[in-house]
Image (tube, rainbow, N blue to C red):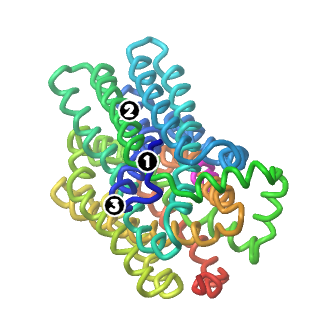
Amino acid sequence: MIKHPASRNPWSFLPTLYFAEGLPYVLINTVSVILYKRMGLDNAHIAFWTSWLYLPWVIKMFWGPFVDVYSTKRTWILATQATMSLCMLAVAFSLRTESFFALSLAAFFAGAFISATYDIATDGFYMLALTEKEQALFVGLRAGFYRLAMIFGTGFLVYVAGMLETSSNNIAWSWSTVLVISGLIFATAALYHKFILPFPMADGEHSAEARKQEASFLEVMRAYFGQEKIGVMLAFILLYRLGEAMLLKLVSPFLLDQGSAGGLGLTTKEVGLVYGTVGVVSLVGGGILGGWLISRYGFKRCVWPMVIIMHLPDLFFVYMAYAQPGIGLVYPLVALEQFGYGLGFTVFTVYLMYSANGRYKTSHYAISTGIMALGMMLPGFVSGWLQQTLGYKMFFIIVCCMTIPGMLTIPFLATDKMEER
């Protein structure tokens, strides 16, 4: 009988687990925006329809208990990675058809459900396979590689698409090729994790115990919404990324639009270079530094500095909208923005993780991230229309103002209780 390892060095599987968690998210919610922009759709149309792709992350709380009860987190991880590979291949095929928008959007939507399920399983696996001390220590690593995947998508893959566009003069074929590459990456990740992921005892025991107790959905929800200061907690989760939610849908169109439309007029390849070089280093560095600082000094002492460093660089987009600088200045501004985001998102991730406790912590984490996704989805519906109505300059000013509501909730969070953990 083969004896499976109950644990492994987290460095052997955490980077790939969270890279594989971030990549579908960025392909579905961010790269799809660039793809549709290059295929000729307008900003309002793109922002409205791609905002619907957040929906599976919003409602994943409804099947979070199912992932908790049936099978192990390890099995869910392998199954969802393999299925995600098929979804990306389906999107690639759809781009070669006349009904590319409807078909690709449907395939992306299916991929969003699979990715949301993968998130539940992976985050649950993280909390079961690592001790609480390890969870705090490695949160920067997981956040860093999650964001590395996002930069890989918006950087390297977009750069490759841009190169193929230039050499072939065929936009649909170029993006189909990039999505085939993405599908192969997910297939490789499933194969790698089949052999490298440990079999933590808590994973199997947790599933067996959950099946015995058969906790109802209402019981899980009652436990979640019965937490201390739940109103403040919900407001923080919903509002913390409000400005980012508006910004995210319009950053790529802003970089790609010509100067006459208020944009910077970069090529697809240049957008990939901006995010795929200095963006990578800055973002991963910010994420890893953020995790180390929180593990050393605690959440309460780190939250305000990191939140401010995250939101302050939004002012760079106001400056770029007015000054329309060349690509030489775009590089350092993006680097600083990505570094700040790495720090700020790390503190937010730690808060979500620490606020998920008790016997339903996997489901509670799924509920929190679902509420976070709702906060990302709703502003996206109006961001494209708002930008087209007001222009990029006023739009980015509004984005900066939208970072304030989330910060106003921070003094009321139950941070003292978190420090005890």
Q: In the rendered view, does 257 fall on the left or right side of 122?
A: left
Q: Which residue is disc 1 drawn over?
A: 250
Residue 377 located within the stretch drawn in magenta: yes
Question: Does residue 233 appear to the left or right of 152 in the view shown?
Answer: right
Q: Which comes sooner in the sequence, label 2 or label 3?
A: 3
| Secondary structure mostly taken by the magenta-highlighted segment of the chain | helix
Q: Is residue 204 visible?
A: yes
- Check disc 2 and report its element: helix, strand or loop: helix
Real-space Cα distance between discs 1 and 3?
35 Å
Residues at marks 2 and 3, CA–CA distance in whole angstroms: 21 Å
**Where residue 160 sits in the image (x, y, percent)?**
22, 35
Task: Relative to 276, say whether 312 is above or below.
Answer: below
Q: Amino acid at mark 1?
A: Leu
* Horizontal and vertical percent position of residue 368: 65, 60
Q: Sequence order check: which comes first, mark 1 or mark 3?
A: 3
In the rendered view, does 55 fall on the left or right side of 343? right
Q: CA distance from mark 2 to mark 1?
A: 31 Å
**Along the viewing direction, whichever of 159 and 23 lies nearer the viewer:** 23
Q: Which residue is labeled 2 in the image? A: 187
Quadrant (top left, top right, bottom left, bottom right) of the C terminus? bottom right
Camera-side residue of 259 and 355:
355
The residue identified by callout 3 is 11
Inspect the image, locate mark 2, and give the three-letter code of the amino acid beneath it: Ala
Taking the spot 34% from the left edge, 65% from the top edge, the residue there is: 337
